Image (cartoon, rainbow, N blue to C red):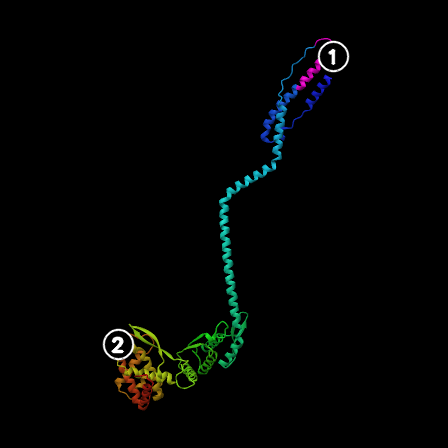
Amino acid sequence: MQVTSLNLIQEEAERISLPNSAQFYEHLTDKYAQMKESFSKTTDAVRQTAESLLCDLKAKEDKPFESQQLSGGLPTMKSTAISEVNLLIQEHNRLTEEFSEQVAQSREALEKDSVATVFSEFRKYEEDLKSSNEAIKSSESKNAELDGEIADLERQISEHRKPAEELNEDLAKYLGHDAIQLEILDYGYKIVRNGILAKALSEGEKTAIALLYFLKSLEDERFELENGVVVLDDPVSSLDSNALYLAVAFIQERTKRAAQLILLTHNFTLFKLAKRWFINMNSEWDRDGDGTAAKPARFYMLDWEYVDGTRTAKMKPLDPLLEKFESEYHFLFSQIYRASKDNRDVDLAEYYSLANVARRLLEMFLAFRSPGATGDLPNQLNSAKLSSPQIGRIVKFVHSHSHGDFVGESEHNLSMLSEGRQVMKDIMALIRAEDKAHHKAMRRLVEKAGAYA
């Protein structure tokens, strides 16, 4: 029975096989190699002891009645060898089970290291992204604003298209023909002449189109005509007399519902037509005829004076002659007559404007007295019934100081300007000498109208 047990021990010792060191994690291989060597020595000692005991038992069996001495002693073995190997294997298995977690931790550590490495660059990109997003928002806001402006402009253009046909009808009435037309485009219109793009429009045609378009714009729904103020500044430049009458008719019709109309002009014909229109309006307003009703229309004129050496414009009530009579000649006569009677000390500069007035008055008066020499004022004056010194003084005065804004040095004679009042007297004397009855009648009109006090 002991033999059998020893054989089993020997066989089990030979069957024991430890794992290959290559199967362990690298940091465990050295320790495992040491444990494996210690374990191998222990198993070898066990085999050798079992083999020695088997030999002794065989010898005893052969000589059962003889005393036998054991051939070898008990081997020295490390009792913890197998336990240490098992603990190392358990450590390896534990690391294997935790491998996924370690990998995750390692990855996290690598990520943190990578982030730390590029963090400053990341912050820069983050700031750039923030700036870009703000720029995008600003651009989107600006685009929305521009889209709104575009929509508004398209709406305005669309609204401008609506009155095109009515404007064409007005142009035909105004110009007396329908050669000039507004042709509708997608977002507006173009001006054509006989179906072809109009080029080199005359000043009269431009004035007609501009005036009619402006009057049509008064019907815009965004403008309350009944509560609005309409200002027309010299709207009839470059128009012939027929067109001028039509212009006034259009102005009168299209502005009759306006809360206030301000009409400015240098054109005397337009002034006369507007004056007649306003006077009739005032007459209809004062239906009782007692003059107590407030006039809906007022007349004013721009005059000028020198203040501290500076020419200054001022607005004042219209000269009574201009308001009561329909002749520019009446007004010019009153200006020269007033100057001839004015005994105030005035600046010489005031006589610059009187030179133009004097020239215009003489041209109008002498056009009837000497029609054959029209356009030649010196010759017309020379044939007048006035002394040579007086004629010479008048000619030099109007010739030197009534031609534009620039006065040549040789003609800039202050002594001549200082004789301005006497020249005005000479002109009145000339008119009286040529037509005494006319001078008397004009003087009465001036004084009655209050132009001279």
Q: Secondary structure at mark 1?
A: helix
Does the magenta run of residues contain 50? yes
Query: Where is residue 418, by image quadrant?
Result: bottom left
Q: Is residue 40 left or right of residue 385?
A: right
Q: Earlier in the sequence, mark 1 or mark 2?
A: 1
Magenta-drawn segment: 46-67
Q: Is residue 265 part of the magenta span, yes or no?
A: no
Q: Does 243 sit left or right of 449 as displayed?
A: right
Name the residue beneath numbered marker 1.
61
Magenta span dominant secondary structure: helix
Circle 1 residues within 10 Å: few <14, some 14–19, many ≥20:
few
Q: Position of residue 130 (x, y in %)?
A: 50, 51
Give above or below for 139 relative to 61. Answer: below
- Is there any visible trace of residue 131 in the rendered image? yes
Displayed quadrant of residue 365:
bottom left
At x 70%, y 14%, the residue is 55
Compared to residue 216, the image places residue 136 above or below, namely above
Most foreground residue, 285 or 156: 285
Q: Nearer the viewer, residue 416 or 169?
A: 169
Answer few, some or many: residues within 10 Å of disc 2's Cα (few below 14, many 20 plus, some between 14 and 19): few
Which SS class for mark 2? helix
Residue 211 at x, y = what percent?
46, 76
The N terminus, quarter of image: top right
Mark 1 and mark 2 in contact? Answer it, CB < 8 Å: no
Read off the residue under disc 2: 414
Residue 243 spot, x, y in % from top left = 46, 81
Q: Quadrant of residue 35?
A: top right
**Viewer-proximal residue among 265 and 174:** 265
Question: Which label sits in the foreground, 1 or 2?
Answer: 1
Q: In the rendered structure, find residue 179 and report the number of the disc placed on it.
A: none
Q: Quadrant of the C terminus?
A: bottom left
